[in-house]
Amino acid sequence: MIKLALSDMDNTLIPFGAPHVSDRTIEAVHAVLDAGVFFGPATGREPLELKRFFQGDEACFRTGIFSNGKRVHANGVAVRTILLGHNELVRIDEALRGEKGVFLVCYPEQTDETNPAYGVRTTKPELAVFEGRTHFTGTVVDEVPNEDFIAATIACPGPPERMDRCRQIIAEAVPEVRIVSPIPEWFDVLPAGVSKASGLDVLLDALDLTPSEVVVFGDAENDLDIMRRVPHAVAVANANDEVKRVARHHVGSVGEDGVAEALLEIARATAVGETPAFLADEGLE
């Protein structure tokens, strides 16, 4: 029986760049909650950002894995917070200095609904491209500020080959972190050992659940670890090829509200003690 449904946000629950999830999605989340199943995002984004995505409906993210596992909330209670090391961020910035147009973005732990961030050693026009794309309010600075940061990203404009080079640079210069790409030209920075999967372990412990009671929906590289952790891993139809290979089940695309329809099926099946059809049938495209 499914007792927890977790979904990535961008390009899984909501089309990338859309201002908020669909009304159908909010309806589906509440149907799952009303059926006694926990629901939560498993996302690289922060809880305050999700107020916009869920149109202020905080019931939709009382439980979840945020900032790619650095924050975990269980039914409204914060059960994990991991900050990024200042020294590691400084070394990332130093390692990237030879790469024109590639820069670090740091997000303070003390934040607000504008999602403030620092673009390190970049220009306002370069920063503005990614501000609009990923929805943060940026300030250009010459060095990593000496304050607490909950998240960091790397802007890496250019072809996939440049992304590969950036991976190599960071792996060699700062082995204490790993970088994963949720969207093209963009990396999330994570402490080694921290991921959505490690956040799942914390969340399962807090809710007294097992991996077999969880369904996880995803589409991109930063979803792979958590999808490998559960037997009910589900790819949306627009997922990348690796996610599709890892997933045991498949649903419709983000543009078709594929996850919302799956959540409604979970709610229906839970009410009558059945296995959701998309899980029993090994996934429906």
Image: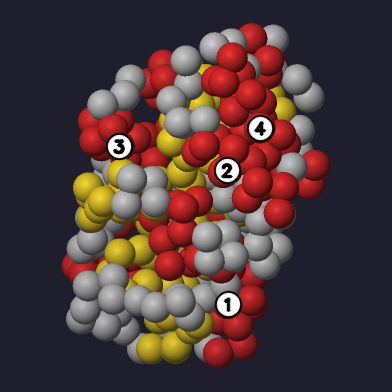
| Residue 83 visible here | yes
251 up-or-down from 123: above or below: above
Along the line of sight, which residue is nearer the eye, 268 or 107? 268
256 up-or-down from 22: above or below: above
Disc 2 marks a residue whose amino acid type is Val
Q: Secondary structure at mark 2?
A: helix
272 up-or-down from 97: above or below: above
* Earlier-in-chain disc, 1 versus 2: 2
* Earlier-in-chain disc, 4 versus 2: 2
Q: Residues within 10 Å of mark 1 (few under 14, many from 20)?
A: some
| Residue 100 visible here | no
Q: CA distance from mark 1 to mark 4?
A: 34 Å
Residue 116 drawn at (x, y percent): 43, 80
* Earlier-in-chain disc, 4 versus 3: 3
In the displayed structure image, the side of residue 214 where residue 221 appears, left or right: right
Q: Secondary structure at mark 1?
A: helix
Which label lies toward us, 1 or 4? Answer: 4
Q: Disc number at residue 131?
A: 1
* Earlier-in-chain disc, 1 versus 3: 1
Which label lies toward us, 4 or 3? Answer: 4
Q: Quadrant of residue 8?
A: top right
Q: Secondary structure at mark 4?
A: helix
Label 2 belongs to which residue? Answer: 29
Along the line of sight, which residue is nearer the eye, 31 or 213? 31
Residue 89 drawn at (x, y percent): 29, 67
Which label lies toward us, 1 or 2? Answer: 2
Disc 1 marks a residue whose amino acid type is Glu
Q: Disc number at residue 203?
A: 3
Disc 3 marks a residue whose amino acid type is Leu
Label 4 belongs to which residue? Answer: 264
Residue 150 drawn at (x, y percent): 30, 64
